[in-house]
Amino acid sequence: MALVPRPDVIAEAGRRADIYLRGGSISAVQFSFEIHPESRAIMFHDRSRLRNTNIKPFRFRTDGHLRQHVLQHGIEYVINTGGDRGELYEFELRWVQKEDAVQRAEQGYETAAARVQDSRWARTVDDGPTELPSWYNTRLHTPADGGVQRTTAGSALGEGAYGKVSKAVDLDSGYSVAVKKVVLSKMKELAPEDRENHVRREVKTLSSISHVCMSISF
């Protein structure tokens, strides 16, 4: 079997990766840039065994094991990695077109996959396994997971009397989410108790919905 990369990987950095980093604190794969298979967002992942990779201006969530973040086009990111506190290397992320990056990653995967059919690229018995496990096994379902805490701005899906719904991407998990914002200023004509009851009904209704693609946060 030939060496076939995962179709969602754009690039990896580490001791055995596309970008070679030297040092005893560097893992085989220190960090990676990947395409989320559901939302197609470009994500940054800390793969280091010592968790000594950080990205600014955002921070990884501290309430769980998610060491990943959706990269938003136009934001200038700084990546620190290696050493005891991530001080060994510093990278500045420079943007190209997202569509180009996704297309090149997919073309590279198709080229590598075609090698499986070519005997010249056959793996010898001494070669190790080539398939990597899927990283995308975490969706934030419950309050115990912390729920969705921050999202992209999103695009409008609909609007009601007191709120707007937009399609966005959870910045931590990378999954697409629907965000509903209740606009309290539109409730000015309601009495305070009616306003409170309306919000309570909204929360109760949304809390009663259960779907594999849904996570409720307030």
Image (cartoon, rainbow, N blue to C red):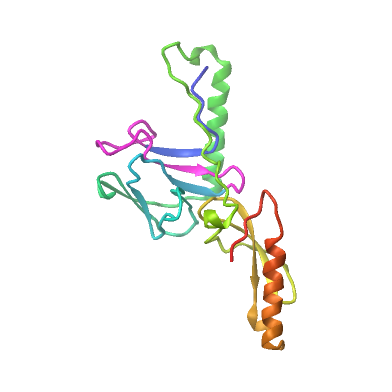
Q: Is 120 situated above or below 147?
A: above
> In the rendered image, which quarter is residue 17 located in?
top left
Q: Residue at x 74, y 72 (%)?
A: 160
Q: Nearer the viewer, residue 135 or 215?
A: 215
Q: Is residue 123 left or right of residue 91?
A: right
Residue 131, x across and y down, in percent: 51, 26
Residue 117, x across and y down, in percent: 58, 17
Q: Is 111 situated above or below 184?
A: above
Q: Nearer the viewer, residue 9 or 45?
A: 45
Magenta-drawn stretch contains 34: yes
> In the rendered image, which quarter is residue 195 located in?
bottom right
Question: What secondary structure predominates along the stretch shown in magenta?
Answer: loop
Q: Residue at x 33, y 36 (%)?
A: 27
Magenta-colored span: 14-40
Can residue 184 be seen by looking at this rendering? yes
Q: Residue at x 39, y 34 (%)?
A: 18
Q: Residue at x 70, y 78 (%)?
A: 197
Q: Is residue 147 left or right of residue 186?
A: left
Residue 86, x across and y down, in percent: 29, 49
Magenta-drawn stretch contains 185: no
Q: Split into 4 quadrants, where in the image is the C terminus?
A: bottom right
Q: Is residue 206 left or right of residue 112?
A: right
> In the rendered image, which quarter is residue 136 located in?
top right
Residue 148, x across and y down, in percent: 56, 58
Q: Nearer the viewer, residue 84 or 14?
A: 84
Q: Nearer the viewer, residue 22 or 215?
A: 215
